[in-house]
Structures are given as structure tokens and as C-alpha cells.
Image (cartoon, rainbow, N blue to C red):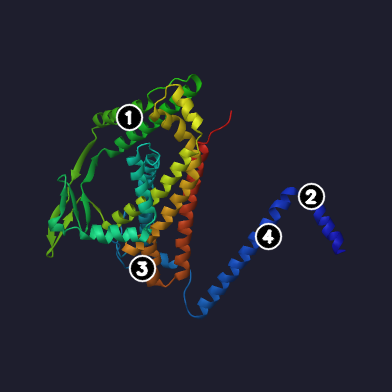
Amino acid sequence: MISNALKSFNIFLENNPRFKVYFPQGLLIFFLLIVVLYFSINAGTNMASRGIETGFGFLNKKAQFDIQFSLIEYDGGMSYGRAYLVGLLNTILVSVIGIFFATILGFFFGILRLSSNPLASGLATGYIELFRNISLLLQIFFWYFAVLRLLPPPENSLIIFDFVFANIKGIYIPRFDWTNLDYFLYGLLFTFLLIYFFNSYTKKLRNITGKQLPNISISFLILFLVPTIVIFLFNVKLEFIYPELKMSKNIYNYEGGVTIIPELIALAFSLSLYTSTFIAECVRAGILGIDKGQKEAAASIGLTKNQILRLIVIPQALRIIIPPTTNQYLNLTKNSSLAAAIAYPDIVLVFAGTALMQTGRAIEIVSITMFTYLTLSISISILMNWYNKRISITER
């Protein structure tokens, strides 16, 4: 009877190949859910027997602690949920800054390492080997304690270009005070859309007729002319609010302007330098992956080295560069959690540190923090996979 049932089941699987594929996966997911549910119920029962409260209601309670640096309004009288948002935005800020500069440095040194000039390639090799082989945490400590913490006090600040002030408490720069900013932003949006459609047209024209327009020069011209017209047409004005040195309770400090705290500088600088070395190797591998014959063919029709690199090599190399570079973006975002070592108020220090110690909600807070990093990583992966698919070379 059992053999007949198994035989019938095998026949069913042969007639339903999709069920054969998805049924084992469904069983695995069901098993994992059972395991998670078991441990969740077990943990909840044990905590209830010890009188430990559970749940996420604590997010609405007052945090009662201050945060040194925040992109949004915050004070100690606000909720733990608000503190979580502050930490999340600070994490996203340092990650975006790090990814931006790591990409620029990585492409620059990756291309420079392939230079025929031994001095240039040696400089790039030295840069990559130096910062790649030193622990990221040590680099953070170096830039924070050995460089930024040695800056003078506010009353003896280093003055750069008469409007940038650097001292042990951070770097102070003028703050922009705009009039009719919304019109200027609309103008910029229109400018970027115009540049995008223009470049799409030039690319299509080049593919059909082979005619190459000076799209970079024209794009820069559009970028200059359109915002300038908007500024004069809608009376857009910009004023600078400069930092001023003042004394409060016998302590000197700068007020006004924008403050860039040393913790943000050290962390963003270290993440950029460290991650850029790995991106540089991804770029170098991508360029070397392009057949030499294509470069020679491009040179034979009169293209310059710059045109060969920009029009032939890089577009094809990107399909090799993007996947490993995505991994480096993910590593940079997760490595930003080392911010707690120098007290930069990211989500780990603010939420998984201070909030956890005050509330004792270890399971809830650690779960939220883990889910946050998971969401950030998946978002970066989705964005980069979309970009990789968009620039992929389609066969005709």
C-alpha cells in the first residue's frame, strides 16, 4: 500500500514539474518558520515568567538622552522611535558619503594602476596596498585620535580661505540661506532631465549613423545656462551665514553655519579610503577583461586614448565591475557600524547601544537593528542590479 502511494506520488511529480521544484522549498520555509516560532514562544514564556516586558511599545516612550549629531530635530524629550530615526539617518549619511568618494577614488586609482607611466602606476599600487592591508578599525582610530583630535581648540582654530574653521570640535563652514529655493530646485530637475534626454538622443544617433556629438561639452553648457536663466528669471538669491566664535560659560565655540563633527569626518574618510582600494581592483579587473583587439581596432579608426577608454573600454568593463563593486558597497554600509568605536551616533551606538541599555529590550532592539541593515543591504542590491541590467550589452 505504501509502495503504491509512493508510486502515485512520483507519477504526480512527473506530471507537475513546477510542484516538484517548489515543494521542497516550501517544506524548508515551513520548517524554518516552525523553528523561529518555537524559539520566539520559548523566549516570550521565559521572559514573562521573570516579569520582563516584551513588545515594541517602548518606541513611544521618552528616550531621555541627547544625541550629539542629528539631521532632524531631536532632543531628550522625544521618543525612542525618534532616536532610532536619527541613528538610521546618520548611518545612511555616512554610507552615502563613503560610497560616493570610494567610487571616485576606486575608479581613479584602478585606471591609474594600469598606466604605462611607472610613477603613476607605482603610486596607485602603493595607495592600494597601503590602505587595503591595514585594519579598517585602526584606520578609523588613526584619523580620529592621531589627526583630528590633535587640532587646536576653538579659540585657536585653523582658518582656511577665511570662511572654513577647523578645530578639535569639528569643521565649521558657512550655511546656505536661500530665497525662492523651490524654483531653483525645479530648474535643476528640468536641467537633469534635459541632459538625460539629450544624451539618450546622442547615443541613439551614434548607434544609427555613427555621428559623435560633443555631448559632454553640451551637457555642461546646459548645466550652466538653464540654472542661470532660472536664477535671474525667478529672483533666486543665496546668502551665506558664517560661523561666529562666541564664548558661553567661559567656553569658546562657533555658532551659526554648518558643523561637521570629527567623528563623521574620520569615519567617512576611513570607509572611503579602505573601500576604494577594493573598488580599484574591481575596476582594474574589469578593464583587463576587455579584449586587447577592441582597443587596437578603436585606435585604428582614429579614436584617441581618452575616447577609447570612455567609449569602448569602460562601457564594456562595467558589466564586470558592477557585481563585485556592489559587494563593496554592502561591505561599506555594514562596516559603518564600527562608528560606535569613536562615538559617532549611528544606529548601533544610538539604538543598539544607549537605547538598549536604558530599556533592556535586547531581543526587540537587536531584531530591529538587524532588520534595518538587512533592508539597507537589499535596497542597495536591488538598485545596483537594476543599474547593472540597464547598462548590460544586449545582443542584436
Counting residues from the start of the chain, the first of labels 1 and 3 encountered is: 1
Whether the residues at callouts 1 and 4 have beta carbons within 8 Å, the answer is no
Whether the residues at callouts 2 and 4 have beta carbons within 8 Å, the answer is no
- Residue 14's label in the rendered image is 2
Counting residues from the start of the chain, the first of labels 3 and 2 encountered is: 2
Counting residues from the start of the chain, the first of labels 2 and 4 encountered is: 2
Whether the residues at callouts 3 and 4 have beta carbons within 8 Å, the answer is no
Q: Which is more foreground, mark 3 or mark 2?
A: 2
Residue 61 visible to the viewer: no
- Residue 27's label in the rendered image is 4
Query: Marks 3/2: CA distance?
Result: 57 Å
* Residue 81 figure quarter: bottom left
Counting residues from the start of the chain, the first of labels 1 and 4 encountered is: 4
Residue 139 visible to the viewer: yes
User: In x, y percent, where is residue 14?
Assistant: 79, 50
User: In x, y percent, where is residue 164?
Assistant: 19, 48
User: In x, y percent, where is residue 125?
Assistant: 37, 46
- Residue 220's label in the rendered image is 1
Q: Which is more foreground, mark 1 or mark 4?
A: 1
Query: Marks 2/1: CA distance?
Result: 62 Å
Q: In percent of the image, x 19 and y 43: which residue is there?
A: 240
The amino acid marked with disc number 4 is Leu
Query: Marks 2/4: CA distance?
Result: 19 Å
Counting residues from the start of the chain, the first of labels 2 and 1 encountered is: 2
User: In x, y percent, where is residue 263?
Assistant: 29, 58
Q: Is residue 233 above or below residue 16?
A: above
Q: Is residue 340 left or right of residue 238?
A: right
Q: Between residues 284 and 231, which one lies in front from this camera angle?
A: 284
Q: Quadrant of the C terminus?
A: top right
The amino acid marked with disc number 2 is Glu
